[in-house]
Image (cartoon, rainbow, N blue to C red):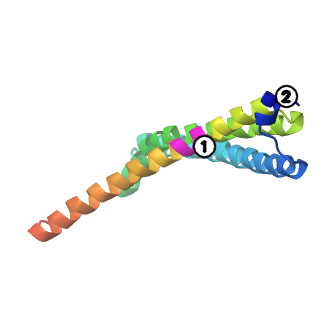
Amino acid sequence: MTEQQDQQPHLAQDGWEAYHAAAKWARFLAWIGFALLAIMLFAAVWALRLAYFTPRIQGINKDMISMAMYFGWSSPVIAMLYIFPVWLLYRFSRTAIRASRQKDIGVLRDSFQRLHAFFRYIGILMIVFLGIYLLFFIIAGTAAMLGLGEQ
């Protein structure tokens, strides 16, 4: 064995099998994510249809129409945030399944890079949302201390 082959990482057979099983679950979760995205966008289209075309009908609640508009316009924004991690998870699963079938360390390294990109995106998104929540609580606490919520 050469020195370069000694430095190459390797997995035992049970490690490859566990990695393949994890990749299959990642693929399942990615397909569920794609299906939920499709359902979300389909519901958004129907909500916008309801909001824009039913006000002509007598007796429609105005609050219901405004909620439908809010849902219809906010769902595509949420879908844009959600599609990227689902796509990254799908790419990881596809590459990981190929790596476990071929037992190729180069493809394995590529799949780990894709998994790293997935977790990095989720981590950044979490930091952004925690910052938004913190800002909301600071504003709400300041408004409560100043008595801005009282009528």
**Residue 117 located left or right of residue 71:** right
Is residue 7 placed above or below 55 in the rendered structure? Answer: above
> Foreground mark, 2 or 1?
2
* Circle 2 SS class: loop
**Rendered location of residue 38, percent (x, y):** 63, 41
What numbered label is drawn on residue 2? 2
Quadrant occupied by the C terminus: bottom left
What numbered label is drawn on residue 8? none
Mark 2 crowdedness (10 Å alpha carbons): few <14, some 14-19, many ≥20:
few
Q: Mark 1 or mark 2, which is nearer the start of the sequence?
A: 2
**Residue lying farthest left?**
146
**Rendered location of residue 10, percent (x, y):** 81, 41
Q: Main secondary structure of the magenta part?
A: helix
Residue 98's image quarter? top right
What span is in magenta? Answer: 116-120
What's the amino acid at mark 2?
Thr
What numbered label is drawn on residue 37? 1
Is residue 114 placed above or below 63 in the rendered structure? Answer: above
**Rendered location of residue 28, percent (x, y):** 75, 48
* Circle 1 SS class: helix
Q: Is residue 64 or residue 39 the one in the foreground?
A: 39
What's the amino acid at mark 1?
Leu
Q: Is residue 70 magenta?
A: no
Q: Is residue 63 or residue 6 the one in the foreground?
A: 6
**Rendered location of residue 14, percent (x, y):** 88, 52
Q: How many marks?
A: 2
Q: CA distance from mark 2 to mark 1?
A: 50 Å
Q: Is residue 149 visible?
A: no
Is residue 114 placed above or below 68 in the rendered structure? Answer: above
